Amino acid sequence: MELFLERLISGLTNGSIYALLALALVVVFRGTGTLNFAQGELALFTTFVAWWLTTQSIPVWIAIVAALVLGFVMGALIERTLIRPVQRRNDMAVLIVALGLFTGLNSLAGLLWGSETKIMPSPFPNGLDDYVSIGGARLYFDALGVWGALIVLMFLMTLLFKKTKIGLHMRAVADNPESATLAGVRTSRVLAIGWGLSGAIGALAGVLVTPLAPQQLGLTTMFSIFIAASAAALFGGLDSLVGAIVGGLVIGVLEAMLTGYISIIGGSLQQTSALIIIVAILFVRPNGLFGTQKLVRV
Amino acid sequence: MTTIDTPEKTVAPRPSRTPKPRRRIVVEGSAKHRGIQALSALLVVLFLLWAASQPLFRVGQFTNVFIIAIAIVGLNLVTGYTGLLSIGHSAFFGLGAYTTGILITKYEFAPMSTIPVAVVLSFVVGLAVGLPSLRIKGLYLALVTLAVGVSFPEIVRRAEDLTGGATGLVIRSRFLAPPEWTGLVRAERGIWMFWLSAVTLMLVMLLARFLVRSRFGLAMMASRDHEIAAAANGVNVARTKILAFGISGAITGLAGSLFAQYIGALSPDGSFTLLKSIELVTGLVLGGIATQIGPVVGAFAVVFLPYYTASFTSGPLSGVVFGALLIAIVFVMPEGIVGRLTLLSRKVVTFLPADHPSRRKGERPPEEPT
Amino acid sequence: MKRLAQMVSAVAVSTLVLTACGSNSGGSDGGGSGGGDASEVVSADDCADPDAATEEITKTLKVGWTAATSGPLADAVGNVIEGMEARFAVENEAGGIDGVQLEVVVKDDAFNPERAKANVGELIQKDKVHVIDTFGSGQLDAIADDQNDACVPLLFAQASVPAYRDIENFPWTTEYLPSADVEMGVVVESLKKKYPDGATVAMAVNQTESGQGVADGFTKAVEGTNLKIVAEEPLTDPKTAASTLKASNADILVDAGVTTDCLALSQAIGRVGWKPDTVIQPSNCADGATLYEPAGDAADGQQILRWLKDPNNVEFKDDAAVKEYIEQAGANGADSPLNSYTVNGWAIADLMVDNFKRAAASDDGLSRLSIMQAARTQDYQPPMFIDGVKFTMTPTQALGILAFKPYTWDAAGKTFVAAGDVIDISDDYDK
């Protein structure tokens, strides 16, 4: 039981991180119809900035807020200057721009701060004794903090989309950009805000995950998390916020349980086995668990 | 990105300020057309002869380009012409490479005789990967290919007895000597691989050209452009997609087999991760998606761009420059290099099939495609 | 892979016998350490261009690197190269190798074997380097054949692949990093002393070449002892590995991991509340400040083997070699002389300079062949190696480092403390 709870906690914690980054992907997809390949590296870059601020003896919480703001600005700027001009011409080109950003941002972080592993301080107490015991398993406060962050973010997003004008506009643009424009929504501003929002969410995921990640903060930290997060977003349904969260949590728990309990899979087929299960589920629900089916006119 | 459009379709018409330059019309099959074809063939041969006379390391780089180009030709069939984005082609590349590597080192096959096995195996796996396309579409299908790409290195690591696991599989150069009939000795392996890859690339490009122009090619493009309309017009969309995946996988697997013979050292984390898939997709889009020459141009770009950015800059800066270059190229040429050049060249020369309606009536060629 | 290795060595033995019959009737008379005749194992006869291999090197001797100077390993690689360049600068200032100046040429391979292969071709054919070096086993696999065919020495590769310790097949290749078999042999030696009545072992294994090498080395070394491996888990997710291994409740935890695993595993076992009696970390986890300190108490008492003097450690505060190193490396462009990779680069350059000097003093003068022959008969302690640890190569043995000094991490003092004398197992090998 203790072992099971340990695995469940570890899975839910990883899953919360996947869910956060998946949320960022979904917000972009709803606006632009694109999977942002550079989302993970954008989060990596902002996390490096947060780390750098903490080394300048700035408190970690302020550093995190700064990273979120930077994430928002960078996201919006990227949409404005790099994505929009190409997207009008060719969808496939957006993919290459994102790949260029992927390589460029990663190398830029390496250029500015070096490739050596950095230790990002956790905003939550994370000493060896900072835990509560649940049935013998240890739930550390920084893991609890990640769960809390996900819940708060879910609440804020619901508020944004359901109660605010800009949220309404974002939903309108996601539904049908042309009608939204005709109805007087300033589509271009909404798109930039959407990308900014996802940049900020990604930044949050980055600063929360690195103190927990096995590799700490290094140039490779975000890649595997990004792969899991994009799988989570697709699994949940690319246009569904709830889907991203459920998808992230399911993948996190699946990974932990499969690795722990099925010795043939062991640690060596972790990603494979989780992805195979997801593909099998997609067979039953081709648009993900919560995704909506697009009507096609002939 | 849920659909992949042909470059031509999405190019916005530009207002022309100057009067249109006169365009020459060349009819396919005419003497002039034959002449142009012969001239291009001559240029290709001259280029290859020049390339083969370069220092050996340069010849090796060209070999690498040809092999990547073959892999991209394979990817182009499924992603370019059939419109199914694949980020799992690193797995086919790896499957071909490991098939050749295992057959040579464990079963003492001659290198050349491993190629058909690698191709058939990759074809079968390609069909299997294509199966989900029956139900899963768009980016969701890309997730299926992502799963394939992620799994391959994990499976190689797991199947240690066969593949050498994480340690890798090394084919020593004495097993890779050129066949006797070539009269080449072991030390001339580099030149042998150069010609083998060059000839294979040309054959594969001819095959792709033939396929695209066949009924099956029409079916591929029809399912890409409008799946429902294609089905309504009698295209067996399911069969087309699955078969496209199979052929595409086979060609990329062929590239992998050549790659194993070229590099001689395989490791799951070296050349067969998702990063290879990304390299192939980058090459395809840079070169020009759904074009015949695009894969070759794209392969040159993905092999030589990082090489030159690394030689002009040092360390991480080269990565920043490479990223910026990628974005810059897309800004200047969103249809890819070949796509852009084709559009430009149409202002000067237009190629028309002999049975084109405008020919029969003796009219002016059609306006700029919109 | 094993079968391939057997096949390779079978072929190797037969070719050795043939060449021995054909060219050399003398037989080996100096199998002992340092002696022996390197011309028996390295010659220019099989080279594509034998004259180039024996041509005397004048003016400049070029050492060409293919390594990842961009990407996640850029800092480590950069430090190794800076350490080497600093050491060469010192040598050049003192007049070089009999007047021959040393130069380093670097090409980035971004840890991609294809680019490593192309780089080495270019280094040999265009830059005309005389010696090659590289970082990583995948690179080494991709270039060893080409470099052996061209008869350009690849000295002190930063890798530890058993295949390249095969002198007959790869006469022109040597590796710097200690063999995992040797290291684990020393580990098991010390464990046997600590647990005379036997103990249970849990092993966390990284799914890469070096992780597997350590695990295989340990498994081989415990054969026939009363140490028993009771659990083995892959290190894909350190948290999962820690939970699962904790259930085995073993006395000893062996981290068969790469550099990035050490801290993660320490933190993970700390968090699941497991405190094994002994934790063994691999020798590549040498940096205290980044790999042990952040884990706090969880890393206390962990054991590691070292062969280099650690300039950060008070133990070497008054060591003449360390003082000189810090001063000279800093003065010659090494940004972070205290980094263990910089020390490695410096030590490798020391070993190279020793080879070059002996080659220059040989009858044939300084050439690629004489450098390689010198490298095959080396018995030298670079000043930055811990006293009692030497780098030893003979015509029959290519293991290099065969001795280590054990250390334990002191979490309170934030430093490594020596945990005994140098353990030398060269007697087990050089026979």
Image (cartoon, rainbow, N blue to C red):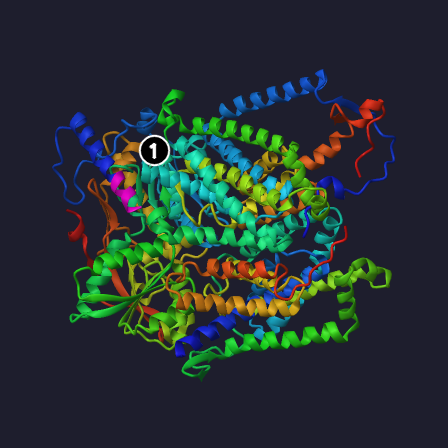
In the rendered image, residue A155, in percent from the top left (x then y), is placed at: 66, 77
- Give the left or right position of residue A188, taking residue C362 as reference: right
Q: Residue at x 18, y 25 (%)?
A: C22
Q: Residue at x 70, y 20 (%)?
A: B29
Regarding mark 1 in the picture, which secondary structure is present there? helix
* Residue C10, above or below C200: above
* Residue C92, above or below C366: below
- Give the left or right position of residue A283, taking residue C114 as reference: right
Q: Which residues are magenta?
A: C1-8
Nearest to the observer: residue B190 or residue B247? B247
The residue beneath circle 1 is: B175
Furthest-top residue in view? B31
In the rendered image, residue C92, in percent from the top left (x then y), is placed at: 38, 41
- Give the left or right position of residue B11, taking residue B220 as reference: right
Residue A213 in view:
no
Main SS of the magenta part reads: helix
Mark 1 belongs to which amino acid? Phe
- Crowd tier of the residue under label 1, counting other residues whose Cα lies within 10 Å: few below 14, some 14–19, many 20 or above: some
Q: Residue at x 33, y 39 (%)?
A: B105
- Give the left or right position of residue C7, taking residue B15 as reference: left
Q: Chain of mark 1?
A: B
